[in-house]
Amino acid sequence: MNTPAIRLTMAQAIVKYLQVQHSERDGRTRRLIPAVFGIFGHGNVTGMGQALEEYGADLPYYHPCNEQSMVHTAAGFAKANHRMATLACTSSIGPGATNMITGAATATVNRLPVLLLPGDYYGNRHQGPVLQQLEHPISGDVSVNDCFRPVSRFFDRILRPEQLLTALPEAMRVITDPADTGAVTLALPQDVQLEAWDYPAHFFEKRVWRVERPQPDTQRLAEAVDLLKKAKRPLIVAGGGVHYSEAWGELAAFATAYGIPVSETFAGKGAVRDGKVLCLGGQGTSGTPLAAKVANQADLILCVGTRLADFTTGSQSVFQHPEVRFISLNVCSRDAHKQGALPLKADAREGLRALRLAAAEVKPQAAYLDQVAGWQREWQSQIQKEIMAQVPGEAMSQGQLVGLLNEEARSGDVVISAAGGLPADLLKLWDAREGKECHLEFGFSCMGYEIPAGLGVRMAEPSGEVYVFIGDGTYLMNPTELVTAMQEGLKITLVLSDNCGYQCIRALQVARAGHAFGNEFRLRNPESKRLDGEYLAIDLAANAASMGARVWRASTPGEVRQALREARVETRTCAIVVPVEKHRYVPASGVWIDFGVAQTTQDPITQKLRREYEADQQKQRFHY
């Protein structure tokens, strides 16, 4: 029997295939990859570029300013869509491809799906070595794209056009697998992009990839209920899996039914959306003192959709109850078994629902809840007295700026941050319970993520304000996607905290080395020969204005509020630049983390810090 065929180049086949891929969950179907970002060079312009021009009517093309940025945009888009949709990104061979590697790592570490299509060397090798081709002395088939392998959840090099018949479905499978998703890289040799083949016509028919919701094992459920019955001081740690499974309602129902307080990881920030839940704020080293106190005394930790990174566990120092046990509800088996936990391998929403129904005999611990509620009131009072209050003679603090933005934000608004001190301040202070979403990328803590990710969020959520909350150091890493925002009419609002450098790393440096060195934007001092002269005068507002943003310079709480209100009604991208006090920080959580101190030094300050570090190491525990 003859199968109807369509003759296409490999690049054309990719474009046609992507346009008919859909995801589905809970009966809702949507385009899986509705657009492609790309920067063209000799390695992809005649292949992918030609294919998009001829066949890409239903695959809109966006032109960013930087290859790393477009991957961050795809990740932000995927996160805003709870991983049910993402974007494709195409680049040339060479620096175009390697620029995407940081974006790939950020996506994979954060379990966010992105599809990367870098150009590659010539498959037939007649032209080699081609421009930008890596010549490896012992591996003739290696290219710079092999750098994608460790930061991709799936990698393939397409050396024949017919290999797409297996590579593309596998790519879609990984993109839609909640337990196995991340960056997917298909390296495309530039000559093979142009080669034609007779593809089966049915390959380009609509396909729907169902994202399933695995149910927990009944025996594991019974074991989890037994642990809940015995617990006197339980705690829920909510991670990103709560968002990706849209489990906010089930989390609230479970927590309120059984009287269990909830803390949130960076990825899980905003998981608590119901005011009835006893929310402790951020968990771990960068979290609240309130969450730290509760975690320190908890005898049962229910981990929901979290991979339990070191900032969450305080390098295994925060859970100090001598008989603490863990239940880990996670769609990923590896994560479900961490901490020696009782594993509940399941979708977060379905797992919480099943556990709530199975645990009918569990009773809330009234005295425990009253105690934690009292601690919560103390923390809220501390916020008002120590963080929101203006210190005479000082500039506004960064904590104040977070609080002001939170007060001005409305339901449906989103704030985005990734690196520096701001993610920690947002983790401590942001209140998402009135529909004010908070996206924190702290799996990779990638400076330069925020602005392009903000564009991705705006593409996914056309209503509400999208606040990109960044420091001056992060802004200087990657401001150029403001041009893309202007080009595409994608309005975001930058809130730029200007403290003249990388002040959170300076604080860490002082805490662990005893001295500040190389973390502030200063002139070189001709006497010391070091960068400890006067602070640089950098006009960040003028820079943002030069790329099309409407700009405000705001130095007081009143000016910040006015700028935020004017920005809300503005239609183009906005930037509010706020000078903040350089060395004033939000109160620490009190949770230790294993950032080391030099073992040998002649400096008495560092020697003292080493002794303190060695004493603090005794807090670390293995949970197995």
Image (cartoon, grey):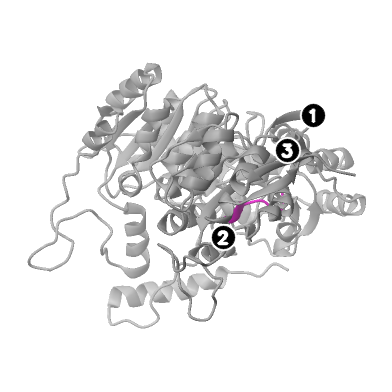
The residue range painted magenta reads 177-187
**146 horizontally vs 563: left or right:** right
The CA span between labels 1 and 3 is: 22 Å
Residue that label 3 marks: 204
Camera sees residue 299: yes
Q: Secondary structure at mark 3?
A: helix
Secondary structure at numbered mark 2? helix
Which residue is rendered at x = 66% and y = 53% of the image? 161
What separation in Å lies between label 3 and label 2 (alpha carbons)? Answer: 29 Å
Kindly identify the amino acid type of the residue bearing the numbered disc 2.
Val
Q: Mark 3 and mark 1 in contact (Cβ < 8 Å)?
A: no
Toward the left, the furthest residue is 527
- Quadrant for the C terminus, please: bottom right
Q: Earlier in the sequence, mark 1 or mark 3?
A: 1
Residue labelled with disc 2: 151
Question: What is the x, y in percent for residue 421?
Answer: 40, 49
- Mark 3 burial class by Cα count in 10 Å: few <14, some 14-19, many 20+: some
User: How many angstroms separate mark 2 from mark 1 (CA)?
Assistant: 32 Å
Q: Amino acid at mark 1?
A: Gly
Which residue position holds label 1?
A: 27
The image shows a total of numbered marks equal to 3
Mark 1 element type = loop
Locate residue 511, reporting x and y percent.
36, 63
Q: Nearer the viewer, residue 84 or 502?
A: 84
- Decide: few, some or many residues near mark 2? Use Cα within 10 Å; few <14, some 14-19, many ≥20: many
Q: Amino acid at mark 3?
A: Phe
Q: Report x, y in % for residue 276.
A: 66, 29
